[in-house]
Amino acid sequence: MVEYDRVETDVLIIGMGGAGLRAAIEIIGRGLRVALVSKSLLGKAHTVMAEGGIAASVANVDSKDNWQVHFSDTVAEGVYIGDYRMAEILAKEAPERVYELERYGALFDRTPEGKIMQRAFGGHTYRRLCHVGDKTGLEMIRTLEDKILHTGNSRLLDETVITKLLKRDGRMCGAVGFSLRSGRFITFEYKAVIIATGGLGRIYKVTSNSHETTGDGIAMAFEAGAELRDMEMVQFHPTGMVYPPGVKGLLVTEGVRGEGGMLFNTKGERFMLRYSPEKKDLDARDVVARAIYHEIQNGNGTEHGGVYLDITHKGAAFIRKKLPGMYDQFKEFAGVDITKEKMEVAPTVHYFMGGIKVNPETAGANVDGLFAVGEAASGLHGANRLGGNSLADLLVFGMRAGISAAKYAAATNAIKPDSAEVEAEISRVNSFISGSATPAANPYEIIDSLRDVMSEKVGIIRNERDLGEALRVIGELKQKSKGVSVKGPVRFNQGLLGCIEMEKMLTVAECVVRSALYRKESRGAHTRSDFPKKLKEWKINIICTRSGGSVDLSTEPVPEMPEELSSLIKPEVYE
């Protein structure tokens, strides 16, 4: 008999970021048991790295703003392949979720009248982002955690790694994992599970994402039969740090440009006037990222491979008040005083628009009992995410996922996972711990190779040859990964964690590359140099499904929106 601990709950939430915590509040409020699991520490979720603000049309600064304009901006900047119903729900419900967060205790910056302050952000028609300096995500996590910890009826297990989701009779029913802290294996028995594990930025070498963002939840849902959508859509944020090497990729919030920062090349040219004369430095992220990429490629970049971002003209007092995190970040890590000196920035992998396909009303996937929310879910952002819509997404759909999972669990009888399947998964994980003196392969060498090929071949500008080469390398790495092993016990074994993450990273990377090869056009964050135009026939969603051990691709038309909504947005233009 394999020894393991058991946790019984009504709903299991994998991920303790903003989405998972907001979902848990709804479940607890309905009197159900909830267990939240995170492979990192409580409070260390990637949500804390979201700095600029929450997009919501509360119209405190620009009185003309409303949900209709927010909806239109979201659909248009998603290049018309997003789920219109998700965009409608977000635009309508975000204001109340912001006020709700305020009632929970969030301390927003204020207008002179005492209302929640809002700032400009790329792609938004009006100043829409409700913010707490440049630490909005941190304040969100603090507030939601405080709400959870003072409510009760929840079990929080941080430093706990989930390795596999289990289902029986077509329904989700369990999960297998282990505690890094104790070294003991755990099985979770539940009626519903919510995937809130974030995106997959760490499959790239240069990213703003935290170390935990390795696509685990997306991969496990895929392995359990969930459909994935738009996996080719990886957003490169225009501004990440480029120097020193230890902080390369660390996010430089869009709030810098929202507060008046401007981009310059080494010739002193404000180059966005050429690429986007109307929206300039605050155009959509894909537009600005490509512009910076081209400037660097054309020899107009800095010595460290970036361009300059300058906000010194706003004055030291303004900068320290509005952007205290950025001031400290550059001062501490780069020795740069942004009140007096320019910042060096370059694009960094930032957000994943693809992920698990969900119902816009319920956040439910195509597998009974499986729900997904936040960056792990797809549909809302289409081909490009508007800044600030991510934190709004966590609140709006976190609440909806919690309500839906609670209703499902309340109406469902629990079924036990197959004990043989549980024991087989524990044995599989244990098999990574080698008794040999010389392991056949190191998981982190495979992860490094994956990051290299994704960065070099599946970046901002793509083509068939590079994508084909990336797919070939991923195939080789999958074969090599079968010989991976590490030494030591389960407890705090980072090598074992690397083995688990390696598997998930290879799975999602293959889906990204296959989808990017399949989409033969340029749309939003997906740019093909060999198919440079946006094409009407590719106004579709690409769906990944698992067939045995392979990835199958299919397409679905983007649903036509009703006339009362389509009349709110500008018609899509093709060359």
Image (tube, grey):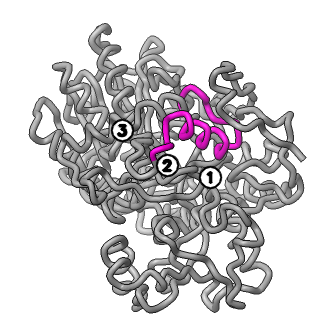
Q: What residue type is labelled 2?
A: Gly
Tell me how far mark 3 sits from mark 1, CA to CA: 22 Å
Span of residues in magenta: 63-86
Kindly identify the residue that appears in the image at 20 percent across and 54 percent down. Answer: 181
Image: 6 above or below 494: above
Residue 169 image-quadrant placement: top left
Q: How crowded is mark 1: few (under 14 residues within 10 Å), some or many (20 or more)?
A: many
Compared with 182, 283 (above or below) is: below
Residue beneath disc 2: 199
Residue 253 visible in the current orientation: no
Cα distance, mark 2 to mark 1?
10 Å
Labelled disc at residue 55: none
Between disc 3 and disc 2, the foreground one is: 3
Discs 3/1, front = 3
Left or right placement of residue 391 versus residue 23 in this view: right
Picture coordinates of residue 284, whole percent (x, y) = 63, 56
* Cα–Cα span, label 3 and label 2: 17 Å
* Residue 234: mark: 1
Percent position of residue 227, x then y: 59, 28
Residue depicted at x 39% and y 75%: 326
> Looking at the picture, how far across and down is residue 392, in whole percent?
42, 42
Amino acid on which disc 1 is placed: Val
Residue shown at 71% from the left, 77% from the top = 271
Name the side, left or right, on which 230 lies relative to 555: left
Occupied quadrant, residue 177: top left
The residue wearing badge 3 is 395
Q: Is residue 147 above or below residue 335?
A: above
Numbered disc 1: secondary structure? strand
Judging from the image, what secondary structure is the residue with disc 3 in?
helix
